[in-house]
């Protein structure tokens, strides 16, 4: 049996089973976090340019943008998926090196609107998309992540599985939806190694492509069922000898959606252990930025490869600058949306501290990646003290999760400037009871 068929058989079984209460709760948490990520992304340049470009697909169709504007299902998936990734606040599944929510939930919402799904049907589609795609990401592994942006590649499968579930594809059609999705999967790491608007489009295109693959499969379009595990398939092309033999071993018994990471800072998640470690040292010793002579950060190699900008000049670059976000945290106490406003980007105190921060790869920390995202922070003070802290995980990781209340605060904080506090609270209340709702937001 090919990998596509393993997943399609599970999808057929999944349709007949009730969702455990814990899984349903975590699915609602994922949707709440998705909306929190979505609203600040709406004002970003890539989303604005997409809206202009897709004008012919807006103000018609059964789906809706986050603003409530009607759209065709594919346009809604593309725009909402892009917006949910644009501000760098979306969820991740650590072991798959992947942001599952942006594409998976965007496609599920578009498909749900298209078929007038209930809230529970929508949540079930979301869970299915997470469970299928995260397992593909785990198998592809670190060799895949070296060149490919998993949110664009693996995200296509999350979108396809979620949409296929919502469109109630039978076992055969579900497998073909995944097979076709594999030929659409793309997104290069190099796309964000320079200042660029392309990165959030990876999530949007994954949402659109996965939805399209499911729509085509519903009409009878077939794909190569061995496209993942064949000798010239995606696994061989995009990874290094991946082993698919256990890809479905824990389906239905271990739900990955219960172990997501929700961001507690804004920016590249690879920087968060260092931010947390620096803030912890500051808390423990009551440090002011002016007291710091030097900072050294030792962490895993992908953090240095991706959060690589030493002297960022734009907000995009700053989100991927390890030295900037740590300096900004130490100077201002947090890394939220304000960290990327022009006044903060040009803050002379932050810039001066950046020049006193160095980074390196720690072999032991690197060996634990991707299952653990750690950083060691060493601070030397002007009065000669040497302070060190090993941050084993990030605030928001499964070992140190955001509480329901913290997730609620995140949504209110990020949605209120866009839709107002009353509408943000009303949306939050609706999302918590989504499993009882006959319609979708």
Image: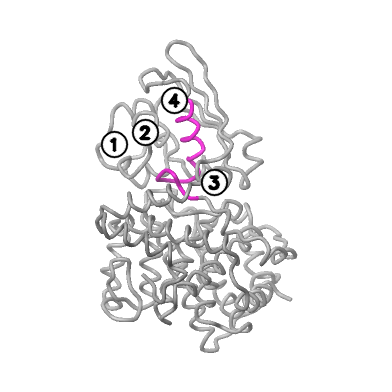
* Residue 166 vertical placement versus 361 (above, below): below
Tell me if residue 110 comes above or below residue 238 in the rendering: below
The residue that appears at 58% across and 53% down in the rendered structure is 259
Magenta segment: 262-282
Give whichever of discs 1 and 3 has the lower sequence position: 1
Q: Residues within 10 Å of mark 3 (few under 14, many from 20)?
A: many
Neighbor class of circle 4 (other Cα within 10 Å; few <14, some 14-19, many 20+) is: some
319 left or right of 150 in image: left
Which residue has dot 1 on it? 344
- Label whose residue precedes the other's in the sequence (4 or 2): 4
Q: CA distance from mark 3 to mark 2?
A: 22 Å
Instruction: Find out whether the residues at labels 2 and 1 contact each other: C-beta distance under 8 Å.
Output: yes
Residue 314 quadrant: top left
Viewer-proximal residue among 277 and 402: 402
Query: Is 388 placed left or right of 78 in the picture?
Result: right
Name, please, the residue furthest toward the top: 383
Circle nearer the N terminus (3, 2): 2
Q: Residues within 10 Å of mark 1 (few under 14, many from 20)?
A: some
| Disc 3: which residue | 397
Circle 4: element type: helix
Q: Earlier in the sequence, mark 2 or mark 1?
A: 2
For the point 54% across and 23% down, the residue is 388
Q: Is residue 278 magenta?
A: yes
Per the model, the C-alpha gap separating discs 1 and 3 is: 27 Å
Question: Magenta stretch: residue 352 in it?
Answer: no
Tag 2 residue: 328
What is the C-alpha distance between the residues marked 4 and 1? 20 Å
């Amino acid at each position: 049996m090919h990998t596509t068929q393993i997943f399609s058989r599970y999808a057929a079984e999944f349709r007949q089973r009730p969702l455990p209460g814990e899984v349903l709760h975590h699915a609602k948490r994922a949707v709440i976090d998705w909306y929190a990520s979505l609203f600040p992304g709406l004002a970003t340049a890539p989303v604005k340019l997409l809206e202009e470009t897709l004008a012919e697909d807006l103000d018609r169709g059964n789906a809706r943008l986050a603003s409530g504007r009607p759209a065709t299902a594919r346009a809604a998936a593309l725009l909402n998926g892009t917006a949910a990734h644009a501000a760098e606040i979306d969820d991740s599944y650590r072991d798959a090196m992947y942001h599952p929510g942006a594409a998976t939930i965007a496609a599920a919402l578009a498909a749900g609107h298209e078929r007038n799904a209930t809230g529970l049907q929508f949540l079930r589609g979301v869970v299915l998309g997470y469970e299928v795609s995260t397992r593909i990401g785990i198998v592809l592994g670190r060799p895949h992540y070296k060149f490919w942006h998993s949110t664009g590649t693996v995200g296509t499968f999350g979108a396809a599985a979620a949409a296929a579930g919502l469109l109630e594809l039978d076992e055969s059609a579900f497998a073909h939806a995944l097979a076709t999705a594999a030929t659409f999967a793309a997104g290069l790491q190099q796309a964000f190694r320079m200042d660029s608007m392309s990165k959030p489009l990876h999530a949007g295109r994954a949402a659109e492509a996965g939805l399209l693959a499911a729509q085509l499969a519903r009409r009878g379009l077939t794909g190569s069922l061995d496209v993942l595990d064949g000798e010239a398939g995606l696994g061989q092309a995009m990874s290094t000898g991946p082993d698919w033999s256990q890809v479905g071993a824990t389906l239905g018994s271990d739900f990955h959606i219960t172990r997501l990471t929700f961001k507690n800072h804004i920016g590249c998640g690879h920087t968060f252990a260092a931010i947390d470690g620096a803030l912890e040292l500051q808390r423990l010793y009551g440090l002011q930025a002016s007291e710091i002579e030097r900072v050294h950060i030792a962490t895993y190699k992908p953090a240095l490869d991706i959060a690589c900008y030493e002297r960022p000049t734009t907000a995009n670059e700053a989100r991927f600058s390890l030295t900037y976000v740590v300096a900004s945290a130490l100077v201002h106490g947090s890394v939220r949306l304000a960290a990327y406003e022009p006044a903060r980007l040009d803050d002379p105190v932050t810039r001066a501290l950046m020049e006193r921060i160095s980074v390196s790869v720690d072999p032991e920390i690197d060996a634990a990646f991707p299952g653990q995202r750690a950083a060691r922070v060493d601070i030397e003070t002007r009065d000669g003290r040497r302070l060190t802290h090993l941050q084993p995980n990030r605030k928001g990781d499964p070992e140190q999760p955001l509480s329901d209340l913290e997730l609620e605060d995140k949504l209110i904080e990020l949605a209120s400037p866009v839709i107002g506090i009353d509408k943000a609270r009303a949306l939050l209340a609706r999302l918590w009871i989504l499993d009882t709702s006959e319609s979708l937001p």
